[in-house]
Amino acid sequence: MNNALIIGQYVPSNSFIHRLDPRTKIVIIFFFVIFVFFANSVASYGLLTLFSISSALATKIKLSFIIKGLTPVWILIIFTFILHLIVTKEGEVLFEVFSYPIFSGAVILGAAIALRFFLLILVTSLLTLTTTPIEITDAIEHILQPLNRIKFPVHELALMMSISLRFIPTLMQETEKISKAQASRGVDFKTGPMKDRIQAIVPLLVPLFISAFKRAEELAMAMEARGYQGGDGRTKLRELKIERRDWLTFFGFALVILSLFLTRS
């Protein structure tokens, strides 16, 4: 398993989060993404952080593995924080860096936005880590089922989203293999002028696109050979069912949201 990026990867386990109905997880994550923007105090951000970390620990997946898998995201988080330090000029001057003043408002706003970004990525990543692509497809299809009345291709949309999530770690692994193969042939991706680095990416992108199109063609041929015709008349091996633990999870999440509004400043 490629630990460089956990988005799209599934880690099998028998944890409480894994046993939840996928619709429960999708709905909770959907509302979490909305309500995280309502946090505006230390207590509210602390509450959301506690909820996110507790959810990650409840998956029984090593927290170090999850944090390491978010390495590419950390770069964006740090960049976001530094950008706010540069462009935001509110509050008092705390200190100077190379004669450039750093304001207290910039530190507070940058930390809030960076933490919010981290929580969003962490919680949404738990969906793919604890839910198989098939379960995600079935859950999205069930949630969007009312759109079938207006002839909206719900099944095809859910299938495309599931395949896209599944291909993310596959393409990452393919990129790593191609980059190592090109490096063994003398291609340098890390040193030299920026122009040479950009030109060195071309031998990486061309075989990657060829491999991606080849995999897509093989998948299409396999689906056609098995008689795939969309969602009409299809049955499922496992029917989704909301159980007691799902209702308890909804109730617990509702308490978290209620506490969030009570702790807002």
Image (cartoon, rainbow, N blue to C red):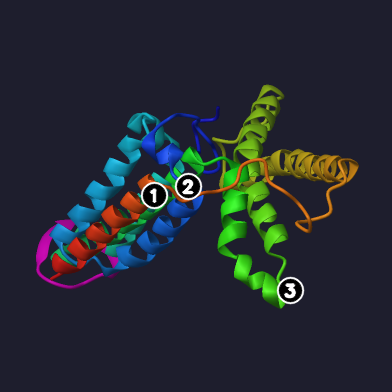
At mark 1, the secondary structure is helix
Return the disc, 2 or 1, that comes first in the chain's sequence.
2
Q: Is residue 181 visible?
A: yes
Taking the image as shown, residue 155 lies to the left or right of residue 104, namely right
- Where is the N terminus found, in terms of image quarters? top right
| Circle 1 Cα neighbour tier, 10 Å, few/some/many (<14 / 14–19 / ≥20) | many
Q: Is residue 199 magenta?
A: no
Return the disc, 3 or 2, that comes first in the chain's sequence.
2
At mark 2, the secondary structure is loop
Q: Residue at x 25, y 54 (%)?
A: 48
Q: Which residues are magenta?
A: 85-97
Kind of residue at disc 1: Asp
Between label 1 and label 3, give the one nearer the viewer.
1
Kind of residue at disc 3: Lys
Q: Is residue 197 visible?
A: no
Residue where numbered disc 2 is placed: 21
Residue where numbered disc 1 is placed: 246
Residue farthest top in this picture:
184
Tell me where residue 167 appears, x and y as whole percent: 66, 42
Image vertical order of residue 132 relative to residue 106, above or below: above
Instruction: Mark 3 and mark 2 in contact? Answer it, CB < 8 Å.
Output: no
Instruction: Mark 2 and mark 1 in contact? Answer it, CB < 8 Å.
Output: yes
Residue where numbered disc 3 is placed: 151
